[in-house]
Image (spheres, rainbow, N blue to C red):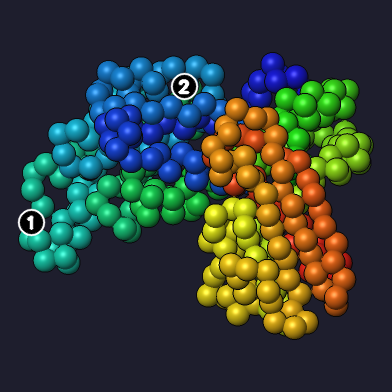
Amino acid sequence: MSRENIAPDKIALLATGDEISNGDILNTNSQEIAQRLYNQGMHVGMHMTTPDTVTEIEQAIYFLLQSHCALIITGGLGPTSDDLTRYALGNALKRPLIFDETTWHAITERFTKLGYGEPPQSNRQQALFPQGATIITNPHGTAAGCQMQHDGKWIFMLPGPPPECLPMIETTAIPCLIQAGLQHTLYRKNWLLFGVSEGQIAEELDAIAKPFSCTTGYRLFYPYIEFKIYSNHEKDFAALLPLIEKTITPYLISNGKITASTALQETLKQTNFTLGICDQATGGLLEATLKSPENQAHLYFSTDKNFPHNMPHIVITGLDDFWQGKFDLNQTWLKTSFTHNNATYTIDKKIPFRGKRVKQYAVELLCYQINQFINEKIY
Protein backbone atom coordinates (compact mmCIF):
# COMPACT_ATOMS: atom_id res chain seq x y z
CA MET A 1 0.00 0.00 0.00
CA SER A 2 1.46 3.32 -1.02
CA ARG A 3 2.28 5.81 1.68
CA GLU A 4 0.79 8.44 -0.62
CA ASN A 5 -2.64 7.15 0.43
CA ILE A 6 -3.57 9.48 3.28
CA ALA A 7 -6.12 8.25 5.81
CA PRO A 8 -9.17 10.53 5.65
CA ASP A 9 -9.87 10.38 9.39
CA LYS A 10 -6.59 11.35 11.00
CA ILE A 11 -6.26 12.83 14.48
CA ALA A 12 -3.75 15.63 15.02
CA LEU A 13 -1.85 16.33 18.23
CA LEU A 14 -0.72 19.81 19.28
CA ALA A 15 1.43 20.41 22.37
CA THR A 16 1.94 24.00 23.49
CA GLY A 17 4.61 25.41 25.76
CA ASP A 18 7.94 27.24 25.69
CA GLU A 19 9.39 24.48 27.86
CA ILE A 20 8.68 21.95 25.08
CA SER A 21 9.65 24.05 22.07
CA ASN A 22 12.86 25.16 23.82
CA GLY A 23 13.79 21.58 24.68
CA ASP A 24 13.62 21.98 28.46
CA ILE A 25 11.30 18.98 28.75
CA LEU A 26 10.27 16.12 26.48
CA ASN A 27 6.84 16.10 24.89
CA THR A 28 5.80 12.81 26.47
CA ASN A 29 2.08 13.59 26.19
CA SER A 30 1.97 13.33 22.41
CA GLN A 31 3.90 10.06 22.43
CA GLU A 32 1.61 8.50 25.02
CA ILE A 33 -1.60 9.82 23.47
CA ALA A 34 -0.56 8.67 20.00
CA GLN A 35 0.16 5.17 21.30
CA ARG A 36 -3.20 4.97 23.05
CA LEU A 37 -5.07 6.15 19.96
CA TYR A 38 -3.13 3.74 17.75
CA ASN A 39 -3.90 0.87 20.12
CA GLN A 40 -7.58 1.68 19.65
CA GLY A 41 -7.27 1.38 15.87
CA MET A 42 -7.28 5.12 15.16
CA HIS A 43 -5.19 6.98 12.58
CA VAL A 44 -2.78 9.46 14.15
CA GLY A 45 -1.65 12.27 11.87
CA MET A 46 0.64 15.22 12.48
CA HIS A 47 2.28 16.07 15.79
CA MET A 48 3.07 19.76 16.29
CA THR A 49 4.63 21.82 19.05
CA THR A 50 4.36 25.58 19.50
CA PRO A 51 5.77 28.08 21.98
CA ASP A 52 3.44 30.06 24.25
CA THR A 53 2.30 32.74 21.83
CA VAL A 54 -1.31 33.27 20.82
CA THR A 55 -0.47 33.81 17.15
CA GLU A 56 1.61 30.64 16.74
CA ILE A 57 -0.88 28.45 18.60
CA GLU A 58 -3.72 29.91 16.56
CA GLN A 59 -1.85 29.30 13.29
CA ALA A 60 -1.10 25.70 14.31
CA ILE A 61 -4.76 25.03 15.15
CA TYR A 62 -5.94 26.48 11.86
CA PHE A 63 -3.34 24.51 9.89
CA LEU A 64 -4.05 21.16 11.56
CA LEU A 65 -7.80 21.45 11.18
CA GLN A 66 -7.42 21.75 7.41
CA SER A 67 -6.28 18.14 7.03
CA HIS A 68 -7.47 16.31 10.14
CA CYS A 69 -10.89 15.30 11.41
CA ALA A 70 -9.97 15.73 15.08
CA LEU A 71 -7.46 17.72 17.11
CA ILE A 72 -6.15 17.14 20.63
CA ILE A 73 -4.41 20.14 22.20
CA THR A 74 -2.42 19.82 25.43
CA GLY A 75 -0.86 22.51 27.60
CA GLY A 76 -1.27 26.21 28.30
CA LEU A 77 -4.35 26.04 30.56
CA GLY A 78 -2.78 27.32 33.77
CA PRO A 79 -3.32 30.66 35.54
CA THR A 80 -0.16 32.46 34.44
CA SER A 81 0.56 35.00 31.72
CA ASP A 82 2.09 32.39 29.39
CA ASP A 83 -0.98 30.11 29.52
CA LEU A 84 -2.58 31.24 26.29
CA THR A 85 -4.07 28.17 24.63
CA ARG A 86 -7.71 29.00 25.37
CA TYR A 87 -7.31 32.46 23.83
CA ALA A 88 -5.69 31.05 20.70
CA LEU A 89 -8.39 28.40 20.33
CA GLY A 90 -11.14 30.98 20.70
CA ASN A 91 -9.50 33.13 18.03
CA ALA A 92 -8.96 30.22 15.65
CA LEU A 93 -12.59 29.09 15.89
CA LYS A 94 -13.95 32.65 16.07
CA ARG A 95 -15.76 31.76 19.27
CA PRO A 96 -15.86 34.11 22.28
CA LEU A 97 -14.61 32.79 25.61
CA ILE A 98 -17.39 32.33 28.18
CA PHE A 99 -16.79 32.36 31.93
CA ASP A 100 -18.05 29.17 33.62
CA GLU A 101 -19.18 29.69 37.22
CA THR A 102 -19.18 25.95 38.00
CA THR A 103 -15.51 25.65 37.06
CA TRP A 104 -14.64 28.73 39.10
CA HIS A 105 -16.46 27.27 42.10
CA ALA A 106 -14.47 24.02 41.73
CA ILE A 107 -11.20 26.00 41.62
CA THR A 108 -12.18 27.98 44.72
CA GLU A 109 -13.18 24.82 46.56
CA ARG A 110 -9.88 23.14 45.69
CA PHE A 111 -7.86 26.09 46.99
CA THR A 112 -9.84 26.06 50.24
CA LYS A 113 -9.36 22.32 50.79
CA LEU A 114 -5.62 22.66 50.25
CA GLY A 115 -5.44 25.48 52.79
CA TYR A 116 -4.57 28.26 50.33
CA GLY A 117 -7.66 30.39 50.96
CA GLU A 118 -9.21 32.31 48.10
CA PRO A 119 -7.57 31.76 44.69
CA PRO A 120 -5.92 34.78 43.07
CA GLN A 121 -7.77 36.58 40.28
CA SER A 122 -5.31 35.17 37.74
CA ASN A 123 -6.96 31.77 38.22
CA ARG A 124 -10.21 33.15 36.80
CA GLN A 125 -8.87 32.64 33.29
CA GLN A 126 -9.02 28.90 33.96
CA ALA A 127 -12.81 29.20 33.94
CA LEU A 128 -12.89 30.61 30.38
CA PHE A 129 -13.92 28.28 27.56
CA PRO A 130 -14.88 28.74 23.90
CA GLN A 131 -18.58 29.22 23.44
CA GLY A 132 -20.42 25.93 23.02
CA ALA A 133 -17.68 23.78 24.58
CA THR A 134 -18.45 20.91 26.95
CA ILE A 135 -16.25 21.19 30.01
CA ILE A 136 -14.17 18.22 31.18
CA THR A 137 -13.64 18.35 34.94
CA ASN A 138 -10.15 17.81 36.35
CA PRO A 139 -10.07 15.96 39.69
CA HIS A 140 -6.28 16.29 39.83
CA GLY A 141 -5.78 20.03 39.33
CA THR A 142 -7.36 23.42 38.67
CA ALA A 143 -7.10 23.27 34.85
CA ALA A 144 -10.35 21.87 33.50
CA GLY A 145 -10.40 20.78 29.87
CA CYS A 146 -13.11 20.94 27.26
CA GLN A 147 -14.34 19.32 24.08
CA MET A 148 -16.38 20.64 21.17
CA GLN A 149 -17.28 20.11 17.57
CA HIS A 150 -16.41 22.72 14.99
CA ASP A 151 -17.29 22.32 11.31
CA GLY A 152 -17.87 18.62 11.99
CA LYS A 153 -14.45 18.11 13.59
CA TRP A 154 -13.80 17.16 17.19
CA ILE A 155 -11.46 19.37 19.23
CA PHE A 156 -10.17 18.64 22.72
CA MET A 157 -8.35 21.20 24.87
CA LEU A 158 -6.58 19.49 27.77
CA PRO A 159 -4.08 20.48 30.49
CA GLY A 160 -0.40 19.72 30.04
CA PRO A 161 0.66 17.72 33.15
CA PRO A 162 0.38 14.01 32.24
CA PRO A 163 -1.37 13.00 35.51
CA GLU A 164 -4.13 15.46 34.60
CA CYS A 165 -4.18 15.07 30.83
CA LEU A 166 -3.99 11.31 30.33
CA PRO A 167 -7.01 10.40 32.50
CA MET A 168 -9.06 12.81 30.37
CA ILE A 169 -7.84 11.04 27.24
CA GLU A 170 -9.05 7.70 28.60
CA THR A 171 -12.36 8.80 30.10
CA THR A 172 -13.45 11.39 27.56
CA ALA A 173 -11.44 11.79 24.35
CA ILE A 174 -11.07 8.14 23.32
CA PRO A 175 -14.73 7.19 24.01
CA CYS A 176 -15.87 10.28 22.10
CA LEU A 177 -13.64 9.51 19.10
CA ILE A 178 -14.81 5.89 19.07
CA GLN A 179 -18.43 7.02 19.08
CA ALA A 180 -17.58 9.41 16.23
CA GLY A 181 -16.58 6.39 14.13
CA LEU A 182 -12.82 6.94 14.10
CA GLN A 183 -11.98 3.47 15.43
CA HIS A 184 -11.05 0.85 12.85
CA THR A 185 -10.09 -2.78 12.99
CA LEU A 186 -6.34 -2.58 12.58
CA TYR A 187 -4.31 -5.72 11.90
CA ARG A 188 -0.69 -5.31 12.84
CA LYS A 189 2.43 -7.20 13.78
CA ASN A 190 6.02 -6.28 14.49
CA TRP A 191 9.30 -8.14 14.66
CA LEU A 192 12.76 -7.38 16.01
CA LEU A 193 15.57 -8.10 13.54
CA PHE A 194 19.32 -8.32 14.11
CA GLY A 195 22.35 -8.75 11.88
CA VAL A 196 21.01 -7.10 8.72
CA SER A 197 21.18 -3.52 7.42
CA GLU A 198 18.03 -1.44 7.27
CA GLY A 199 18.45 -0.63 3.59
CA GLN A 200 19.07 -4.26 2.65
CA ILE A 201 16.04 -5.72 4.41
CA ALA A 202 13.69 -2.81 3.63
CA GLU A 203 14.16 -3.15 -0.11
CA GLU A 204 13.33 -6.85 0.04
CA LEU A 205 10.37 -6.58 2.41
CA ASP A 206 8.81 -3.60 0.64
CA ALA A 207 8.88 -5.53 -2.63
CA ILE A 208 7.10 -8.46 -1.00
CA ALA A 209 4.46 -6.20 0.57
CA LYS A 210 3.80 -4.05 -2.50
CA PRO A 211 0.91 -6.11 -3.98
CA PHE A 212 -0.98 -6.10 -0.67
CA SER A 213 -3.04 -3.41 1.05
CA CYS A 214 -0.61 -3.29 3.96
CA THR A 215 1.77 -0.61 5.14
CA THR A 216 5.35 -1.41 6.17
CA GLY A 217 7.32 0.51 8.77
CA TYR A 218 10.86 0.49 10.15
CA ARG A 219 12.52 1.75 13.30
CA LEU A 220 16.29 1.58 13.72
CA PHE A 221 17.66 1.42 17.23
CA TYR A 222 21.15 0.00 16.99
CA PRO A 223 21.86 -2.83 16.73
CA TYR A 224 18.23 -3.73 16.05
CA ILE A 225 15.66 -2.98 13.37
CA GLU A 226 12.02 -3.10 14.32
CA PHE A 227 9.93 -4.04 11.30
CA LYS A 228 6.16 -3.75 11.35
CA ILE A 229 3.21 -4.14 9.05
CA TYR A 230 -0.31 -2.91 9.58
CA SER A 231 -3.50 -2.93 7.59
CA ASN A 232 -7.28 -2.55 7.75
CA HIS A 233 -7.67 -5.48 5.34
CA GLU A 234 -7.72 -8.85 7.10
CA LYS A 235 -7.27 -11.01 3.98
CA ASP A 236 -4.29 -9.08 2.66
CA PHE A 237 -2.71 -9.02 6.09
CA ALA A 238 -3.15 -12.80 6.52
CA ALA A 239 -1.75 -13.50 3.04
CA LEU A 240 1.30 -11.30 3.54
CA LEU A 241 2.28 -12.55 6.99
CA PRO A 242 3.81 -15.93 6.00
CA LEU A 243 5.75 -14.34 3.15
CA ILE A 244 7.27 -11.82 5.54
CA GLU A 245 8.07 -14.38 8.21
CA LYS A 246 9.83 -16.64 5.73
CA THR A 247 12.07 -13.77 4.64
CA ILE A 248 13.01 -12.45 8.09
CA THR A 249 13.62 -15.80 9.80
CA PRO A 250 17.45 -15.63 9.50
CA TYR A 251 17.46 -12.27 11.32
CA LEU A 252 14.59 -12.74 13.76
CA ILE A 253 15.22 -12.04 17.44
CA SER A 254 11.64 -11.79 18.68
CA ASN A 255 8.03 -11.33 17.65
CA GLY A 256 7.53 -7.98 19.29
CA LYS A 257 10.07 -5.73 20.95
CA ILE A 258 11.95 -8.10 23.26
CA THR A 259 15.70 -7.69 22.78
CA ALA A 260 18.15 -10.56 23.20
CA SER A 261 19.48 -9.09 26.47
CA THR A 262 15.98 -8.75 27.91
CA ALA A 263 15.12 -12.31 26.87
CA LEU A 264 18.29 -13.65 28.49
CA GLN A 265 17.60 -11.78 31.72
CA GLU A 266 14.20 -13.48 31.89
CA THR A 267 15.76 -16.88 31.16
CA LEU A 268 18.31 -16.43 33.93
CA LYS A 269 15.58 -15.75 36.49
CA GLN A 270 14.18 -19.24 35.78
CA THR A 271 17.44 -21.23 35.86
CA ASN A 272 18.34 -23.67 38.64
CA PHE A 273 22.12 -23.45 38.10
CA THR A 274 24.90 -20.88 38.04
CA LEU A 275 26.42 -19.88 34.70
CA GLY A 276 30.08 -18.91 34.60
CA ILE A 277 31.21 -16.17 32.22
CA CYS A 278 34.75 -15.01 31.48
CA ASP A 279 34.32 -11.86 29.40
CA GLN A 280 37.58 -10.64 27.86
CA ALA A 281 35.90 -8.66 25.07
CA THR A 282 33.22 -6.18 26.14
CA GLY A 283 35.04 -4.45 28.99
CA GLY A 284 32.36 -5.27 31.55
CA LEU A 285 29.40 -4.15 29.44
CA LEU A 286 27.94 -7.66 29.28
CA GLU A 287 27.99 -7.97 33.07
CA ALA A 288 26.48 -4.50 33.53
CA THR A 289 23.72 -5.36 31.06
CA LEU A 290 22.81 -8.73 32.54
CA LYS A 291 23.25 -8.51 36.29
CA SER A 292 20.26 -7.66 38.43
CA PRO A 293 19.16 -8.50 41.98
CA GLU A 294 16.79 -11.10 40.52
CA ASN A 295 19.41 -13.10 38.58
CA GLN A 296 22.80 -12.40 40.18
CA ALA A 297 22.73 -15.77 41.98
CA HIS A 298 22.66 -17.44 38.57
CA LEU A 299 25.67 -15.59 37.14
CA TYR A 300 29.33 -15.96 38.05
CA PHE A 301 31.62 -13.53 36.23
CA SER A 302 35.33 -14.34 36.41
CA THR A 303 38.42 -12.56 35.16
CA ASP A 304 40.09 -15.83 34.19
CA LYS A 305 39.06 -19.04 32.47
CA ASN A 306 39.02 -21.28 35.55
CA PHE A 307 35.59 -22.22 36.87
CA PRO A 308 34.36 -24.61 39.58
CA HIS A 309 34.00 -28.21 38.48
CA ASN A 310 30.89 -28.99 36.43
CA MET A 311 29.80 -25.35 36.22
CA PRO A 312 28.56 -24.57 32.70
CA HIS A 313 30.62 -21.66 31.51
CA ILE A 314 31.45 -19.36 28.63
CA VAL A 315 34.74 -17.74 27.61
CA ILE A 316 34.48 -14.65 25.42
CA THR A 317 37.40 -13.10 23.54
CA GLY A 318 37.73 -10.70 20.65
CA LEU A 319 37.10 -7.04 19.77
CA ASP A 320 40.88 -6.63 19.73
CA ASP A 321 40.65 -4.01 16.99
CA PHE A 322 38.44 -1.86 19.20
CA TRP A 323 40.73 -2.06 22.20
CA GLN A 324 43.76 -1.33 20.00
CA GLY A 325 42.06 1.78 18.62
CA LYS A 326 41.81 0.55 15.02
CA PHE A 327 38.61 2.38 14.10
CA ASP A 328 39.13 2.38 10.33
CA LEU A 329 37.92 -1.21 9.87
CA ASN A 330 34.54 -2.50 8.70
CA GLN A 331 34.61 -5.79 10.62
CA THR A 332 36.15 -7.32 13.70
CA TRP A 333 36.10 -10.70 15.44
CA LEU A 334 34.21 -12.11 18.40
CA LYS A 335 34.98 -15.60 19.71
CA THR A 336 32.75 -17.44 22.18
CA SER A 337 33.49 -20.87 23.69
CA PHE A 338 30.69 -22.70 25.51
CA THR A 339 31.44 -25.58 27.88
CA HIS A 340 28.97 -27.98 29.53
CA ASN A 341 29.40 -31.59 30.69
CA ASN A 342 33.06 -31.54 29.57
CA ALA A 343 32.05 -30.71 25.99
CA THR A 344 33.12 -27.44 24.41
CA TYR A 345 31.97 -25.82 21.20
CA THR A 346 33.10 -22.51 19.79
CA ILE A 347 31.57 -19.79 17.67
CA ASP A 348 34.13 -17.62 15.86
CA LYS A 349 32.26 -14.84 14.14
CA LYS A 350 32.93 -11.68 12.17
CA ILE A 351 30.77 -8.77 13.28
CA PRO A 352 30.28 -5.24 11.92
CA PHE A 353 32.66 -2.65 13.34
CA ARG A 354 30.84 0.64 13.98
CA GLY A 355 33.31 2.32 16.30
CA LYS A 356 32.33 2.38 19.96
CA ARG A 357 28.95 0.86 19.17
CA VAL A 358 30.65 -2.46 18.43
CA LYS A 359 30.47 -3.30 22.15
CA GLN A 360 26.70 -2.84 22.13
CA TYR A 361 26.40 -5.05 19.06
CA ALA A 362 28.61 -7.69 20.67
CA VAL A 363 26.60 -7.74 23.90
CA GLU A 364 23.28 -8.31 22.15
CA LEU A 365 24.82 -11.02 19.94
CA LEU A 366 26.35 -12.72 22.99
CA CYS A 367 23.02 -12.61 24.84
CA TYR A 368 21.34 -14.33 21.91
CA GLN A 369 24.07 -16.99 21.78
CA ILE A 370 24.00 -17.56 25.55
CA ASN A 371 20.24 -17.97 25.52
CA GLN A 372 20.59 -20.61 22.80
CA PHE A 373 23.34 -22.33 24.81
CA ILE A 374 21.11 -22.54 27.89
CA ASN A 375 18.03 -23.75 26.04
CA GLU A 376 19.75 -26.20 23.67
CA LYS A 377 22.73 -27.53 25.62
CA ILE A 378 21.74 -27.34 29.28
CA TYR A 379 17.98 -27.87 29.29
Position in image of residue 146 (x %, y %): 37, 41
Circle 2: is it few (<14), some (14-19), or many (20+) Cα within 10 Å? Answer: many
Tag 2: residue type? Leu
Q: Given the image, on which type of amino acid does mark 1 rest?
A: Glu
Secondary element under disc 2, as helix, strand or loop, is helix
Q: Report the side of 193 relative to 295 (left or right).
A: right
Q: Which residue is mark 1?
A: 118
The residues tagged by marks 1 and 2 sit, at their Cα atoms, a distance apart of: 39 Å
Question: In percent of the image, x 47 and y 21: which residue is there?
Answer: 65
The location of residue 89, given as percent across then percent down, is 33, 27
Q: Position of residue 230 (x, y in %)?
A: 75, 36
In this rendering, position of residue 38 left or right of residue 351: left
- Asked if residue 10 is positioned above or below residue 143 in the image, the reply reads above
Residue nearest the viewer, comparing 47 with 336: 336
Q: Which residue is mark 2?
A: 64
Helix, strand or loop status at disc 1:
loop
